[in-house]
Amino acid sequence: MVQDYFDKVADQWDKMCCHDINNIRNLLRIADINEGCSVLDVGCGTGVLEKYILEFSPKRVKAIDMSSQMIDIARDKYEDKNVDFECIDFFSMDEKKGLFDRIVIYNSFPHFEDYESVIDKCHYLLKPMGRVLVAHDCSREEVNNLHKDIELKPVNDLPPAKSLISIFSPVFLVDSAVDDDNIYCVSGVKVG
């Protein structure tokens, strides 16, 4: 189970993972986070993104993860009152419709079973003209190969960006998609 795996490796996670800071900042620029935004970080893990999200001066950041151990580590890292960490499953969130300006799903998308349901939930949670970003700070090939080499088996491989665009398209106007040797991202603005 995904939650059990991440609980087990939480205390070593920040040593196990290497994140490209320049790629992270570039991805967050694509997310168009700005002063006054409310941001939801889905699958936040140990809070890798929060330091960089806060550079954009959002009004509020809600960071969620299914792993209680990951959330505990994230909470220990940040005392910023604008960041709220919660151990909860994304689909169990009972937030009001249209609560967030931005949703970022960084390095966690392959761990969801049903991509269409994820995108639908994002659409529900975003305000009109809100933006969702699905991103990895490395290539799709690297992500999929990494998951083959660890005991955790995500339900899905990270799909080609073209495939994800087709899932986004009914409810998001996709204006950014990169699937190259350095990064993977698909981002769009809520329509309807």
Image (cartoon, rainbow, N blue to C red):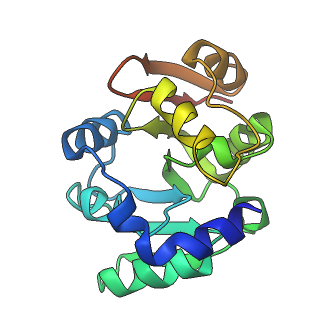
Pick the residue in front: 152 or 102: 152
Rendered view: 121 above or below 186: below
Residue visible at 64% across and 41% down in the picture: 110
Q: Can the viewer see residue 30 in this picture?
A: yes
Q: Is residue 82 above or below residue 132?
A: below
User: Residue at coordinates 45% horizontally, 78% vertically from top-left?
Assistant: 11
Q: What count of labels does the image hold? A: 0
Residue 6: quarter of image? bottom right
On screen, residue 86 versus residue 96, left or right, reads left
Residue at 50% x, 74% y is 10
**Residue at image x 71%, y 23%?**
167
Q: Position of residue 152 (x, y in %)?
A: 67, 54
| Residue 96 in view (yes/no) | no
Where is residue 175 drawn, in percent x and y?
A: 45, 19
Residue 22, percent across and down?
A: 19, 40
Vertical placement of residue 63 versus 166, above or below: below
Which quarter shows the C terminus? Answer: top right
Residue 48 appears left or right of 89: left
Q: State the quadrant of the N terminus.
A: bottom right
Residue 127 pos. (x, y %): 57, 48
In the picture, measured across the screen, residue 143 lies left or right of residue 23, that is right
Quadrant location of residue 145?
top right
Work out whether residue 139 or residue 38 is closer to the camera in this orientation and state it.
139
Residue 48 occupies which quadrant of the picture? bottom left
Q: Please name whichever residue, 1 or 190, is drawn nearer the observer in this view of the structure.
A: 1
